[in-house]
Each structure stands twice: as structure tokens, then as C-alpha cells.
Image (cartoon, grey):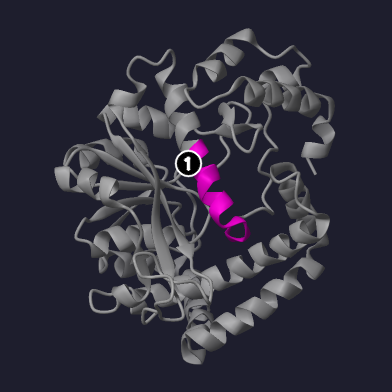
């Protein structure tokens, strides 16, 4: 692969300066005002992007078939509002998530098993999805005293990318380019540094297809392979935005902590390691299916904090694309998953048959 081409510095710097100035506007407005504006923009945006909004509604219909259409549309608008508020909160995070102030914004739920893994120094992967505020997971763990190596996609503008590195480094986060993560992460993980990964991206038609909301979903193989290579424990969790009247975890139901306008609950959903996948007929399939299941659990806790406008199920397995029967080997792998019931397996196969007959609709 050739080196990525960048704009000349004489062009990069003015563009970066303009973007930094635009990013500074929410900071001048203040968090509360900026979030109110973000809410309004999020409610307006679906009217400007009707095609993507309808895709979000369809995805919600597939994931939550028992919901009313009115509820799906309300949650779809909510996910756009979440995206806009997320942009504001990411800008404010370096100012608010500090050693002195993080306790006013981050509240830790039952994360003791995950902390025991971090304290042990054993290899650890921190897994989350595009739900809640995934960047705050790294902030939260680093505030507890565990420097995190977080995988990210480098920004096209090099000055902006350097600024991003510097602001995250000051909070104990080391950013690792996704394009070099295969080489960079194993030594860091073995040295005791937890690695943070957002693990719900599509792996394309050649990815590993595992269940996600009762449907086969493409997932990258690299995370499971990394776990096997380093014998890492996977700690799956999320940073869930707290509602305006919601009590932070760990406090009595009628108590109110000094929540800043950006209040998040740091929640662990699952934790598993080599002892769980050793002996499985297909360890890679087990690891991938289990952390995908954990991401589904995260999304169910806050459906309006997920990116439903994405083409979640666009990539399809080869048997669907080529009109072949559901593979017996895949059915056996699914049946071997400890949490898979016969009814769920039958429904998954039926859904796959339905998707094979309606491939065109998945490309919209």
C-alpha cells in the first residue's frame, strides 16, 4: 500500500485554523447552551437527510420488531440528537475530564471485575461500540490510573491530527493508528497497557458473520485474533449518557450527585478471557460472537445513543449472496455458543433466508 497523500502544509494550516476556530464556538457558548443548540440541530437534521433517517427507522424496526412506528421514529430522532451532542461533549471533554473534575461527570457502575483485570496487569482489551460516548471509556480508565492505548483513524489534516494526539496524551491516552495497530498493539498489551477498541465496524463481505439483534452481521476478525495472540481478557463496557432526572450509579435512588451537564455512567457489560474460549470448537468465532453480543446489550440499554443511520447489515455472508442454503458448518458454530437457544438459532436461520431473498433492500 502506498503512502497516504496529504495536502501541502500551505493549504493544511489555513484549513486547520478555520476548523479550530469553528470548534471553539461551542466552547465560547458554554456546555449547556451548546448542548441545547445541538439538540435543536439533531431534531432538524432528519428533515434534511430523509433517506438516512428512514434507514435508521428501518434498522430500528429490524432490531426492535415489537416497537410501535412512533417509538422507532422518536428514537431515530434521538440518535441524531445524540450525534450532535456527542460532538459538543468531545470538544469539552479535555476541559471537564481532569483529575480534579472527572468525578462530577463520570460515575462508575459495577466495574469491579474489570478493575481486577486491570490491576492484575494481565493483557487486556477494552471493547465498546459506537454507542454512548466511546471516547470517554479511555478517559475514565486513564483517570483511574491505567494509561490506555486507543485505536483510532488518523485525521486527514496532519496539524489537526497532532492536536488530537496532544490533547489525548495529556489525559493518559496514547492514540494508535488503525493502520498500524496490528504491529503496535501486541507489544503494548503484553507490557500491561490496556488497549481500547471500538469493535462494531463492519468487516465487509469477507468479515466474520456473527449474530447481532438476531441477524448475521459482518465483524472484523482482527480483534479476536489479537485476543488469541496476546491471551488477553476482554472487558466490554460503555459510557452511557445519564438522563436529566436519572440518579448516578452507586447512589440511593433519591440522591443527586453534583452532576455536571455532561453526566455519564461507566458500565461493564461482560468480561471473558482465554479460559472461556479454550476448548471451544472455533475460538475466533466464539470471541467475536461474544463481544458482539455484549455490544448489543450496551445498545439495548440506550437505543437512542447508537448510530442507527449506518448500514448495519449491508454486508452479507457468501451463502446469502450466492443463493445457497444456510451452511451446516455455520449452524454448528452457532449452536455451540453457550448462550444460543434452539429458538434463537431457528430464528437466525429464518432471518438469513429472508435476507437472501431481499438483498437489494439491504443496499439502500
Which residue is drawn at the image coordinates 80% and 44% (left, top)?
364
In the rendered structure, does residue 297 fall within the stretch colored magenta? yes
Residue 326 is at least partly visible in this image: yes
Q: In the picture, residue 137 is in which quadrant?
A: bottom left
How many marks on residues?
A: 1
Up-down relation of residue 36 to residue 213 (above or below): below
Which residue is drawn at the image coordinates 72% and 73% (left, top)?
43
Label 1, on which residue? Answer: 294
Label 1 element class: helix
In the rendering, at what x and y percent does residue 235 appear?
34, 43
Up-down relation of residue 283 to residue 218 (above or below): above
Left or right of 218 on screen, residue 66: right
Up-down relation of residue 52 to residue 21 (above or below): above
Which residue is drawn at the image coordinates 68% and 77% (left, top)?
41
In the rendering, at what x and y percent does residue 103 appear?
30, 73
Which residue is drawn at the image coordinates 33% and 63% (left, top)?
139
Left or right of 252 on screen, residue 289: right
In the rendering, at what x and y percent does residue 327 appear?
65, 11
Q: Main secondary structure of the magenta part?
A: helix
In the image shown, does 157 or 353 lie closer to the viewer?
353
Give the magenta part as a residue range.
293-306
Amino acid at each position: 500500500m502506498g503512502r497516504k497523500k496529504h495536502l501541502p502544509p500551505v493549504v493544511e494550516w489555513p484549513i486547520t485554523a478555520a476548523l479550530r476556530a469553528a470548534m471553539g464556538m461551542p466552547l465560547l457558548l458554554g456546555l449547556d447552551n451548546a448542548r441545547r443548540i445541538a439538540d435543536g440541530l439533531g431534531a432538524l437534521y432528519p428533515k434534511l437527510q430523509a433517506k438516512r433517517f428512514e434507514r435508521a427507522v428501518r434498522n430500528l424496526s429490524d432490531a426492535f420488531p415489537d416497537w410501535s412506528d412512533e417509538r422507532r421514529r422518536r428514537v431515530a430522532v434521538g440518535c441524531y440528537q445524540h450525534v450532535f451532542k456527542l460532538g459538543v461533549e468531545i470538544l469539552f471533554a479535555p476541559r471537564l475530564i481532569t483529575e480534579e473534575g472527572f468525578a462530577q461527570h463520570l460515575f462508575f457502575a459495577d466495574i469491579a471485575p474489570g478493575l481486577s483485570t486491570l490491576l492484575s496487569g494481565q493483557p487486556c482489551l477494552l471493547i465498546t461500540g459506537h454507542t454512548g460516548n466511546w471516547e470517554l471509556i479511555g478517559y475514565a480508565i486513564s483517570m483511574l490510573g491505567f494509561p490506555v492505548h486507543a485505536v483510532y483513524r488518523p485525521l486527514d489534516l496532519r496539524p489537526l491530527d497532532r492536536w488530537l494526539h496532544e490533547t489525548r496524551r495529556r489525559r493518559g491516552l496514547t492514540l494508535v493508528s488503525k493502520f498500524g495497530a496490528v504491529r503496535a498493539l501486541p507489544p503494548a498489551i503484553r507490557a500491561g497497557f490496556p488497549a481500547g477498541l471500538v469493535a462494531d465496524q463492519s468487516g465487509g463481505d469477507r468479515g466474520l458473520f456473527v449474530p447481532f439483534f438476531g441477524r448475521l452481521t459482518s465483524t472484523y476478525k482482527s480483534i479476536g485474533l489479537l485476543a488469541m495472540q496476546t491471551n488477553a481478557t476482554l472487558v466490554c463496557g460503555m459510557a452511557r449518557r445519564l438522563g436529566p432526572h436519572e440518579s448516578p450509579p452507586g447512589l440511593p435512588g433519591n440522591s443527586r450527585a453534583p452532576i455536571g451537564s455532561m453526566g455519564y455512567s461507566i458500565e461493564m457489560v461482560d468480561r471473558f478471557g482465554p479460559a472461556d474460549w479454550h476448548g471451544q470448537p472455533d475460538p475466533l468465532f466464539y470471541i467475536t460472537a461474544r463481544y458482539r453480543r455484549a455490544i448489543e446489550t450496551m445498545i439495548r440499554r440506550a437505543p437512542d445513543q447508537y448510530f442507527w443511520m449506518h448500514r448495519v447489515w449491508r454486508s452479507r455472508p457468501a451463502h446469502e449472496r450466492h443463493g445457497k442454503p444456510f451452511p451446516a458448518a455455520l449452524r454448528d458454530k452457532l449452536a455451540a455458543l453457550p448462550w444460543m437457544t434452539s429458538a434463537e438459532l431457528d430464528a437466525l436461520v429464518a432471518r438469513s433466508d429472508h435476507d437472501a431473498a431481499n438483498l437489494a433492500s439491504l443496499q439502500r
